[in-house]
Image: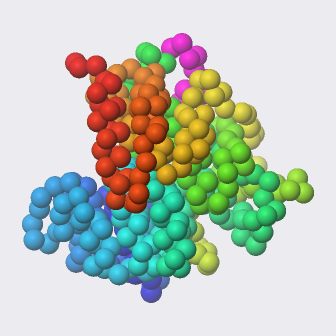
Amino acid sequence: MKRILVLGSTGSIGLAALNVIRAYPEHYVVVGLSAHTASHTLKEQAQDFGVKRLALTGAAAGPEFLTGPDAAVKLVQATEPDIVLNGIAGAAGFLPSLAAVRMGATLALANKESLVVGGKFIRATAQKSGAAIIPVDSEHSAVFQCLQGERHEDIKRIILTASGGPFYERPLETFGAITPEEALKHPVWRMGPRITIDSATMMNKALEIIEAAWLFDLPEGQIDVCIHPQSIVHSLVEFKDTSLKAQLSLPDMRLPIAIALAWPDRIDLNLPRLDFSRMPALTFNLPDETKFRALGIARRALSRPETAPCIMNAADEVAIKAFLDRRIPFNRITDLVEKTLETLWDDHIAGPEDLLDLDRKARGITEGLIPCS
């Protein structure tokens, strides 16, 4: 029996994880659950899975909850899980991930911001404690699977696939007219609002470049992106002999979650399977980095890996909220990220705690760049 802690259990990743765990009660026991403010749903989940340790990071609640911004970290420490599945949204997931690897737990990582904000510290701590980090993002899970049994020195490059989002074919000059309702309609995946908007700007793929650099110990020059609208090939690895390996499946987040929870084993999932007789033609194209400037911003940020990705992520979170609140147009999101990054480009940090101050400073600068309504 593996002891599982699910952080962000009321979000899309958390719900999918509990769906997998529910099907295998003989393999997994849930020892803790956390949410931001959804206390009612969290109580229902706790009753369903017999969980006594709960955390709410964004609301006060009864004595059965750990509460406050550090509640998820306290929950990691209190439950001593074998696996921490981190499905928290945004930079708030960084410290819980750091706490998990500090205690040597396996980190099933759906919170890409953990590595974007503080990849240096997460990786160094995991190496010291012996903690494994298994990616849950479908693209990074695909690369993780393709690299099993391979030597690092044989990797030529990894290729992260992207659906292209809802605006891949939309003219750039019309981006200013895009509404939140349009941007929240992803053509393939059903996700939370932040990651859905990030997919529309391709900032999500930009953050995944940074995540991949830390996960697989590769420079940005060995990480490419291609547009694959069918979302069947989840990523590829090219080796120095020109051979390519790819992982294919129908898009369903329960698969990479199950990979992370069961690894090195695989479990039998009752999911739809690829039917080659009905599969659409698979297409691959290069992204237009003039239209989707976030990709280039991420590559530049990796030249200052300790600070720039943290700034980039913080600015993006503020800009997305401003767009959803109709305070800025869609085409200003990436502008705000770039301007905040330029303002703080020369900042330095001494340790992981300093990243929280840098995150707050970046958010303040971005907010200051948004016109008052």
> Residue 25: which quarter of the image?
bottom left
Percent across and percent down for residue 245 are 78, 57
User: Would residue 21 be found to the left or right of residue 134 on screen?
Assistant: left
Percent across and percent down for residue 298 are 56, 40
Chain part drawn in magenta: 166-174
Residue at 67% x, 41% y is 225
User: Could you tell me if residue 18 is visible in this image?
Assistant: no
- 142, 253: nearer the viewer: 142
Residue closest to the far top? 173
Percent across and percent down for residue 317 are 37, 39
- 307, 116: nearer the viewer: 307
> Residue 84: which quarter of the image?
bottom left
Q: Dominant secondary structure of the magenta stretch?
A: loop
User: Would residue 154 be found to the left or right of residue 134 on screen?
Assistant: right
- 113, 165: nearer the viewer: 113
> Residue 296: which quarter of the image?
top right
Q: Quadrant of the C terminus?
A: top left
256 falls in the magenta region: no
Residue closest to the far left? 62
Q: Is residue 242 above or below residue 61?
A: above
Q: How is the image coloured?
A: rainbow
Residue at 56% x, 17% y is 172
User: Could you tell me if residue 268 is visible in this image?
Assistant: yes
